[in-house]
Amino acid sequence: MHSESLKRHIPVLLLDGVKLVKTIRFGKNIYLGDPINAVKIFNDKGADELIILDINSSKHKKGIQWNLLQDIASEAFMPLSYGGGISEFSQAKKLFSIGFEKIILNTHVFDNTELISSISKVFGSQSVVVCIDYKKNLFGKNFVFINSGRKKTTKTPQVWAEEVVNYGAGEIILQSIDNDGTWDGYDIDMIKQIVPRVTVPVIPLGGCGIRKHFIDAFTNGAHAVAAGSYFVFTGKEKGILINYNI
Amino acid sequence: MNIKIIDYGLGNLNSVKNILKKIGYNDVAISNSALELNQADFFVLPGVGSFDSGILSLKSMEGFNVLKKKVIIDKTPILGICLGMQLLGIDSEEGKEKGLGWLNFSCKRFDSTQTRKVPHMGWNYVDLFDKDYLIKTSQRYYFVHSYYCPENTHNNSNEENSLKWMTTEYDGINFISAVKQDNIMGVQFHPEKSHKYGMDFFKNILDNYA
């Protein structure tokens, strides 16, 4: 029995164009360097998986950075997921062919759920991840946001999670905008609400600061954990050091 | 040694080529042409996707008959990965089509439960059956699949050319994660996505045939 090994710890690399960056609460944007270098380091450290998210695609319509992604795919010897600006079946198909295992859908499927089902029917639901970004309003109620956190929708994460799974999503990344880059821990409350509602793996993202945060997330039902700041900085307000301290 | 990665339209072809390059195997090409497949000393059959589209694409590939002759008659070694392994078998619950039938097994779908999510996605261990083949020690690899080959399907005798396998457990279900009969091999996991463990795996096999 090796159930421990099924718990994945996934570094998240944020791209702004071809630059590696990090954000806090989806706001302030810090430049980190060259993505290929980061990928090589995670390779050597044996990272379970890597998530690449382009925060620029939807915002500025710059499109998917195909050349960079091709380089990343040929450098990485672990499973890769990519998200950012995917709005068409043909883009998903191309991503799979260049070596990505999974594609992450967000903004564009909010009004086009058919994209989820069409990709999962052909490539399998295990290849389709939906990322749900959410934030609390003034009254403390959580709502789903799209367009890199700039546009509020009227759906709650709980409702949207169930819907996307029905359309064929094989995994859900649950990203707390409020916790992003804060090092204060995952939104355990939301994890506990989403996990019982869906039959697919739920992966929290946003707020991880110490190892104990991973453990808390797993204890409360997360199947894998994702983190950005934790794997690229030595600590809150501290220097850059790409690590894989799981 | 000339290695050909079979291009039948499905699978992580470049990732396989790159990891082989990383461990020093440079005479590697991705192909489906009869002429090129005929030159192979070793085949890799990758695969990501559904059973029916896989077997139909494979059978309609230009070099399919050459592949069959090389594997069955010339005994050229072949390694199937993930869907590639499943296609070596008889059939699968995933599709209506028959597989290649080169290995005697069938695939079923994992039942999803609250603890057993489908697909089986993540790192898991392959449990050693026989230290003399395929995998040298109990090791972890990356899996992502919704269909599996059950453990109890067939006899696992010690005869020279009989079907031999290794298993992995996923939430109470033991399935075949590595299989070999003579020159025909298959692994359910993705060695090309299992970084250093995958590199060791490829090295172990290829060094045997080089």
Image (cartoon, rainbow, N blue to C red):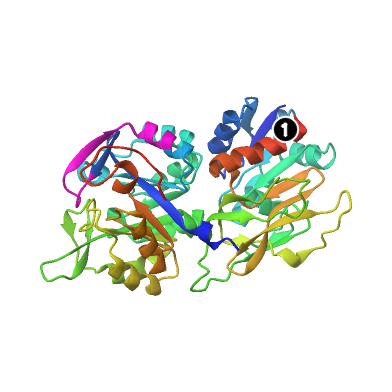
> Taking A51 as reference, is A143 left or right?
left
- Residue B206 shows in this picture: yes
**Image location of residue B179, percent across then percent down:** 73, 52
Could you say which quadrant of the image residue A208 lies in? Answer: bottom left
Tag 1: amino acid = Asp
Q: Which residue is mark 1?
A: B207
Disc 1: host chain: B
Query: On screen, B190 above or below A225?
Result: above
For the record, the magenta segment spans A23-41
Q: Residue at x 67, y 62 (%)?
A: B175
Position of the C terminus of chain B by quadrant: top right
**Image location of residue B127, percent across then percent down:** 68, 56
- Residue B56 shows in this picture: no
Query: On screen, A33 above or below B158?
Result: above
Q: Residue at x 58, y 49 (%)?
A: B141
Position of the N terminus of chain B by quadrant: top right
